[in-house]
Structure formats: structure tokens, C-alpha cells
Amino acid sequence: MSRSRDRTRRHPAYLRRPEEFYSLWIAATSTYGVGDIVSTIAFLTYVPAIEEANPVVAFALDSFGLAGLVALKIAVYLVMLWISVLGAREGDGLLYYFPPVLLTAVGLYLTGSNVWLMWIAT
């Protein structure tokens, strides 16, 4: 039996191990979604002298306000979720694990950076 036929018979990883899938994406949502958005809003509210450094986020904020920030985060999140689900369906571990792990790491860094900048600015 070839490898490709074997992949089509197996259920995707998110169906075989749903707890793992949800845990990965809850971590990504908590850090990248909630942590970064809340800390960015707090940072922009309480430290108005310092502006957003990311030009894409700054454009979204300038054009659409906080809704632009949230929409941008949701768009990135959904693209990464799609890549992860596609990786699970194809049996590609890298594409399955990389998106939520990357978003979690980026979310932790950005949240920590925002909190640290607020702390030193006060």
C-alpha cells in the first residue's frame, strides 16, 4: 500500500486527537488573540506618547480603529487555523503543529513586550 493511499484512510489528527488540537488552539487564542489584543489596547490607551511599531497594525488602527486591529488578528488567526487543518488532513505534522505553536510564541512575545513597555513608560 502506498503512503498516499494510507493517508486517505486515516482520519485527520484533529479527529484522532481532538484534545491536543483544542489545547494547541486555546493556547494560541489566549496569547495571540486575547493577550496581545488586550495588552495592545491597554498600551495604546495608557501610553499614548508611544505609537504602534508594526506598520500593518498601525495602518489597521489608523484606518479602522480597534475594530481594524481585531479584524487583522482574526484574519491571521483564521489563515493559520486553515493551514493547520490542511496539514492535519494531509498528514503533514509540520503544517499541523507549526501554526498554533507559532501564534502562541508570537502572542507570548508581543504580550510580554507590550506589558514591559507599559511598565517602563510609567
Image (cartoon, helix red, strand yellow):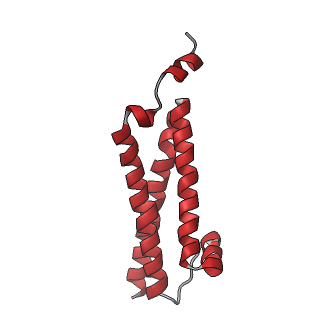
Residue at the farthest top position: 1
Kindly indicate the quadrant of the structure image that contains residue 117.
bottom left
Q: How many labels were placed on the picture?
A: 0
Q: Residue at x 42, y 73 (%)?
A: 38
* In-image side of 12 versus 30 (left or right): right
Q: Residue at x 52, y 41 (%)?
A: 85
112 or 3: nearer the viewer: 3
Please say whether residue 99 is visible from this viewpoint: yes
Q: Measuring from the top left, give residue 103's x and y in whole percent.
A: 48, 55
Please say whether residue 92 is visible from this viewpoint: no
**51 vs 79: above or below:** below
If the image is split into quadrants, where does the C terminus sit? bottom left
Q: Measuring from the top left, give residue 119's x and y in whole percent.
A: 38, 81
Q: Measuring from the top left, give residue 78's x and y in whole percent.
A: 55, 54
**79 vs 90: above or below:** below
**54 vs 88: above or below:** below
Kindly indicate the quadrant of the structure image that contains residue 28.
bottom left
Kindly indicate the quadrant of the structure image that contains residue 60.
bottom right
Q: Measuring from the top left, give residue 80's x and y in whole percent.
A: 55, 50
If the image is split into quadrants, where does the N terminus sit? top right
